[in-house]
Amino acid sequence: MAISKITSIVSSSDMTGKYTLDVGNDTTKFDAFIVENEYQILIDMLGANLYNTYADDQEDEAWKSLLAGEQFTDIEDNIRNWQGLKNMLVPYHYSQWILLNEFHQSVTSMFEPDNKNSVKISSSKRKAESNNAYNIFIIEWYNVFDYMYAAYDVDNDVYTDFFDYFRHKQFKGLFVRKTI
């Protein structure tokens, strides 16, 4: 039996605002980077059981809500907004991309090296920028648990597995940062 895979959630067109990547007209390298890395981060975040449930049925309303975000009431009766996995993964991919690639800075933007009127960005500046984006991702990761707990049937085996997985990963250090 072939393993189903969730279609990439983020693409180069989602990298806007403070996460803009000036890669010119050729976005294939960045999109390939996402395709290569997104599967593993989703498995790490959701656990294999929940990932496979959604991979088998990407039209599921629960998956669409998890992906796009929605308003929910948490366990303390506070109304909160879940921004969705897509918005959560943008800073993650940004942080990984700039950490692993060399960039130059010009007066107007940061971009891959190909401009004679630019200077190379130091690795410490790239790491700081990457860590800032990564920290936003980690903060939102904890919101996943709150959202899932409030929005889904906690007695359903798939979600019970997710909560157990989350607690296990939380104490084991789910996202130990890889450094260059």
Image (tube, rainbow, N blue to C red):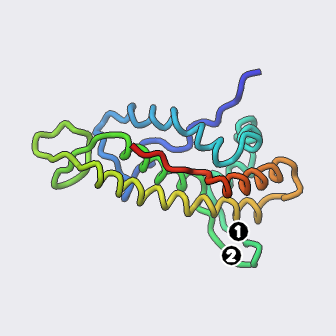
Name which quarter of the figure residue 88 lies in: bottom right
Q: Quadrant of residue 147?
A: bottom right
Q: Position of residue 74 (x, y in %)?
A: 73, 72
Q: Residue furthest top?
A: 1
Above or below: residue 167 compared with residue 96: below
Residue placed at 28% from the left, 41% from the top?
102
Q: CA distance from mark 1 to mark 2?
A: 6 Å
Q: Toward the viewer: 67 or 172?
A: 172
| Disc number for residue 72 | 1
In front of the other: 15 or 140: 140
Count all numbered tags in the image, as a single digit.
2
Secondary structure state at the residue bearing disc 1: strand
Q: Quadrant of the N terminus?
A: top right
At 57% from the left edge and 61% from the top edge, which residue is drawn? 140
Q: Residues within 10 Å of mark 2 (few under 14, many from 20)?
A: few
Residue 134: x, y in percent?
Answer: 47, 55
Badge 1 crowding class, 10 Å Cα cut-off, few under 14, some 14 to 19, many 20 or more, is: some
Q: Report which residue position mark 2 lands on.
A: 79
Going by the numbered disc 1, the residue's amino acid type is Phe
Q: Position of residue 149 (x, y in %)?
A: 76, 62
Between residues 22 and 44, which one lies in front from this camera angle? Answer: 44
Residue at left offset 39%, top offset 31%: 28
Give the mark nearest the N terminus, 1 or 2: 1
In the displayed structure image, the side of residue 31 where residue 106 appears, left or right: left
Q: Are marks 1 and 2 in contact (CB under 8 Å)?
A: yes
Q: Residue furthest bottom?
A: 77
- Image quarter of residue 173: bottom right
Give left or right: position of 135 versus 46.
Answer: left
What type is the residue that disc 2 sits on? Ile
Q: Residue at x 33, y 40 (%)?
A: 101
Quarter of the figure with the C terminus: top left
SS at circle 2:
strand
